[in-house]
Image (cartoon, rainbow, N blue to C red):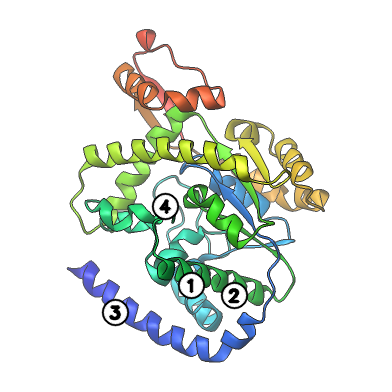
Amino acid sequence: MSRLISSGLLSISNSFFALFENLIFSRKVNRTKLEPPIFIIGHWRSGTTLLHNLMSMDKQFIYPNMGAMLFPSHFLLTEPVLKHVVKHLLPKQRPMDNMPVTWDLPQEDETSILLLHLMSPYLAISFSDQPEVYDRYYELDRLTPKEASLWKKTFLYFMKKLTFKSGEKKRVLLKSPTHTFRIPFLLEMFPDAQFVYIYRDPYKVYNSTLHLRRTMFGDNGFAPLDMEKLEEDMSNIYVNHLDVYERDRQIVPEGQLHEVRFEDLEEDPVGELRKLYEHLNLPDFDDLVKNMQPYLKDQKSYKKNKYEMDAAQEKKIYERWQKAFEMFGYDRLPSEALVKARVAS
């Protein structure tokens, strides 16, 4: 009940501030010109956050910070004040993976989309027992013409707000696993957009995504937790994301898509980012290397979550996600000899 009450009060205040921001800024925002955006895509827990954090160190990019993520309808107006209020309420680390939380780190734009018009699969966090509510917001091909127009208009305006706020002609750098399902939709909006797809060891993605769902849905959902159903749903979404990406990457023009293996990025971030910049023909790589050194130093002390995986779990993961092992070249663990393996995410 308390969640419903707080959600209602927050909705009212958001609508109030959004109205005032629109009156003050809408004309200027609508006149703002956009550069072709870059989308970091891939399944949840595959390394999208790490890659987003690293690339955001490049000053040619802009991105949603905590203010734009939490208050997408009025951050231009209220962020100078809310920043000082909300930052004291933020946890030091994300509950699902111990990654640091600060106001100015880049954030996922799908949360902003959810808060702006509710046409997002992240409705599953609150209504995990009602897939009919959120399933059609992955690929967006089942939207009505009116819904599709609203989705595009709202998303475009949000990106213009990010650009307007920066005060400079910079490219928007976004990351959201949900955009993996929307490549044709996004290319229709932004023909020159570029994409970076990151993938990771399926064992680690499976265990880590299950932990993510248990944490997020348990802390924020209105429906009772059914872990068996959540696990089945997660597994199906992963396989679907593989099928959709395998299909849609064929339509991305040459030079607009690059793929990154998470383990290679973790081992040699400079080398892997150099390949990325060369393939996408991005300038100023040396500046990025210089800017990201403090972050790389901090990452050395980062401790991943650990999960126990027995032979039965290994067998289940491999049988469900065999396509990923073959598609990305990962080896199967020897389950007949496996008693317990500690799987870091």
CB contact under 8 Å: marks 4 and 3: no
Using the numbered discs, state the Cα–Cα distance from disc 4 to disc 3 in whole angstroms: 28 Å
Q: Earlier in the sequence, mark 2 or mark 1?
A: 1
Q: Quadrant of residue 89?
A: bottom left
Q: Nearer the viewer, mark 4 or mark 3?
A: 4
CB contact under 8 Å: marks 3 and 2: no
Q: Amino acid at mark 1?
A: Pro
The residue positioned 53% from the left and 33% from the top of the image is: 200
Q: Secondary structure at mark 3?
A: helix
Q: Earlier in the sequence, mark 4 or mark 2?
A: 4
Say few, some or many: other residues with alpha carbon within 10 Å of mark 3 (under 14 / 14 to 19 / 20 or more): few
Residue 251 visible to the viewer: yes
Q: Amino acid at mark 4?
A: Tyr
Q: Amino acid at mark 3?
A: Leu
Who is closer to the viewer here, 234 or 55? 234
The residue that mark 4 highlights is 138
The residue that mark 2 highlights is 161
Residue found at the very far top of the displayed protein = 337
The residue positioned 45% from the left and 31% from the top of the image is: 204
Say few, some or many: other residues with alpha carbon within 10 Å of mark 4 (under 14 / 14 to 19 / 20 or more): many
